Image: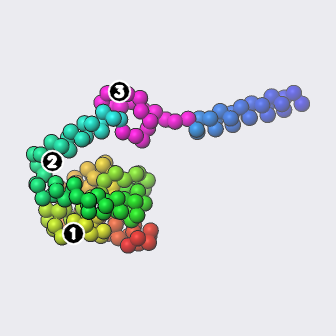
Amino acid sequence: MFEQSIHHSASAFRRRSFNAILLMPIYRRCGRCGARILSGTTCPCMKDANRERYRIYDKAQRDAKSKQFYNSAAWLRERRHVIDDLDDGMDVYAYVVHGRIVPADTVHHIIPLRDDWKLRLSDHNLMSVSSASHAEIEALYKQSKQAAVAMLQKIVRTHRQALGTW
């Protein structure tokens, strides 16, 4: 009898401690400033650094026409529509290619603005991606742009047909 009560209390303790571990938040250190931040979030210092990096890119490299477009209400509305309504806030590329569910924070033009301005607000030319996937896609464009475009168009079509948003 005594052995059963010890065994029962020990297993109950393991169950409680395991459940407590599942509910604890996971933190990581920022690679830039060393601050302790919740895993899956961006440190404020990185947000500031990215904002500055984009400001410099806009000033030095982006043409005035595309800069004006990316700041327009029409683009912001379409961007929100693609991320929230068409792709459920998910990085489509990471999901289809790598089998990972990652939140999307960027909308990628499959055929770039400089190649076909008319497609800038076309749902079929836009896909939700994360920053990491966007960098991976841009690297694919450098290898073979035509192959990358064909692959991305197929990914978007297949994914949205499955979701019923095509």
58 part of magenta stretch:
no
What amino acid does circle 3 point to? Gly
Residue annotated with mark 3? 34
Q: Quadrant of the N terminus?
A: top right
Residue annotated with mark 2? 58
Protein image colouring: rainbow
- Mark closer to the observer (2, 3): 2
Task: Give percent across and percent down for residue 138.
Answer: 22, 54
What amino acid does circle 1 point to? Leu
Left or right, 18 with reference to 25? right
Q: Which residues are magenta?
A: 24-42
Mark 1 vs mark 2: which is more N-terminal? 2
Residue drawn at 39 percent across, 30 percent down = 29
32 part of magenta stretch:
yes
Secondary structure state at the residue bearing disc 3 = loop
Task: Give percent across and percent down for residue 91.
Answer: 37, 56
Q: Is residue 151 visible?
A: no
Residue drawn at 11 percent across, 49 percent down = 61
- Whether the residues at callouts 1 and 2 have beta carbons within 8 Å, the answer is no
Tag of residue 119: 1
Left or right, 34 with reference to 50? right
- Whether the residues at callouts 2 and 3 have beta carbons within 8 Å, the answer is no
Residue drawn at 21 percent across, 39 percent down = 52
Q: Quadrant of the C terminus?
A: bottom left
Secondary structure state at the residue bearing disc 2 = helix
Task: Give percent across and percent down for residue 92.
Answer: 37, 59
Q: Mark 1: few, some, or many residues within 10 Å (few <14, many ≥20)? A: some
Mark 2 vs mark 3: which is more N-terminal? 3
In three-dimensional space, the C-alpha distance between marks 1 and 2, rounded to whole angstroms, equals: 21 Å
